[in-house]
Amino acid sequence: MMSTQVLLDLKNVNKVFGTNHVLKQIDLQIERGKFITFLGPSGCGKTTLLRSIAGFYTIDEGEIWIDGKLVNDLPPYKRGTPMVFQEYALFPHMTVFDNVAYGLDIQKRPEAEVQERVQAALAKVKLTGLEERYPHQMSGGQQQRVAMARALVMNSPIILLDEPLSNLDAKLREEVRVELRAIQQELGLTVIYVTHDQLEALSMSDYIVVFNKGAIDQYGTPHEIYYKPRTRYVADFIGTTNFVEATVKEVSGPEATVEYGINGHTVKVSTSEQVAVGEQVLLSIRPESLRINQPEAGDFTIRAVVKSSMFLGEKERYFLSGYNGTEWIVDAYDIGQTSFEGNVDIRAAADKIHLIKMAD
Ligand SMILES: Nc1ncnc2c1ncn2[C@@H]1O[C@H](COP(=O)(O)OP(=O)(O)O)[C@@H](O)[C@H]1O
Ligand SMILES: [Mg+2]
């Protein structure tokens, strides 16, 4: 990452509330023009970090750099990073114009400048002509554009969005998601978006930051987070997966041969983790990467018993029991062609198996 592209640089950021160590050694660099999602369950510190970046909280240790400037001691209005909250993304009793002008009015900018900047911001989000409307007279997508215009009018280097869609119903949320991402890409904005919804994170982001109890477990693209989770926590949090314990038997470069199950089966997987012979590791295999009773489907093989299955539209989800009672979930997409019961053989190709270190 070229340093000139780094817009937000967090160095060893720590935040404590009383005895609660809420942010733990946060190191993170965010590039200009990217859509970044902070993802994690409720209470893991997402809002606290966002508020710390915006300047509403003072951090206890570390440095926050925005656009090459150390901002630790700057108040929110001098950082220029307004937040959009779920509760009051827009003021319902104000027109679109007044909503967008709000931040400038607070700063008591001259009337002519307010006019000009609001019009320019509305033009950017393609809302020219709708200045006198009220939020309730607009679609969800348009309202989101107004919320973005409110941030744009302040010339914010970064737009911080804290779960802005959580009050919307599922269908509208999907529509607004697409809209938000489109605006961000059209205008090349740098957006930090907070959510606890993993699908939302996977579908919108350039990069996802996965939080685990106030620390960053992984920073990566949606594909990396999904297919190469660094920890069991990340693998578990993002989608559904199967875990198998295994023992490292041989290491050669980026490949490790591991033994799993009760019959001494081995499989060779590639990994970027440093592992040693004898080490206990976890193998993570997604339900869609497993096949039932397909001898050609790969080197990894386990015997299991079908317990139940569930029709999920585009796929049939099977619940199985393996050795020592381990539970397995396998998704089959050839619905109607075959149906499995009793004793079966589950397989996966080696390149669909992801190795996770236990120690994490
Ligand atoms: N102003 C505050 N005073 C004391 N504790 C707080 C405050 N804000 C958040 N916390 C605590 O910090 C932790 C992280 O909260 P928060 O950042 O809101 O998590 P998230 O946004 O991921 O749900 C929680 O344990 C919460 O109770
Ligand atoms: Mg929150």
Image (spheres, grey):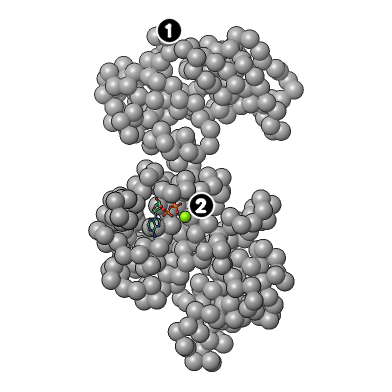
Residue in the picture at 50% in, 14% down: 325
The quarter of the picture where the N terminus appears is: bottom left
Q: Amino acid at mark 1?
A: Asn
The quarter of the picture where the C terminus appears is: top left
Q: Is residue 318 above or below residue 313?
A: above
Residue under pointer 1: 263
Report helix, strand or loop for mark 2: strand
| Residue 216 in sight in this render | no
Q: Is residue 46 above or below residue 284?
A: below
Q: Is residue 128 above or below residue 112?
A: above
Q: Nearer the viewer, residue 127 or 233?
A: 233
Report helix, strand or loop for mark 1: loop
Residue under pointer 2: 195
Residue 253 falls in image quadrant: top left
Q: Nearer the viewer, residue 322 or 253?
A: 322
Of callouts 1 and 2, the N-terminal one: 2
The residue mark sitting in front, 1 or 2, is 2
Q: Position of residue 178 (x, y in %)?
A: 62, 56
Q: Position of residue 143 (x, y in %)?
A: 64, 68
> Residue most toward the front?
18
Q: Position of residue 333 (x, y in %)?
A: 66, 27
Q: Is residue 48 above or below residue 142?
A: above
Residue in the picture at 51% in, 30% down: 241
Residue in the picture at 51% in, 89% down: 113
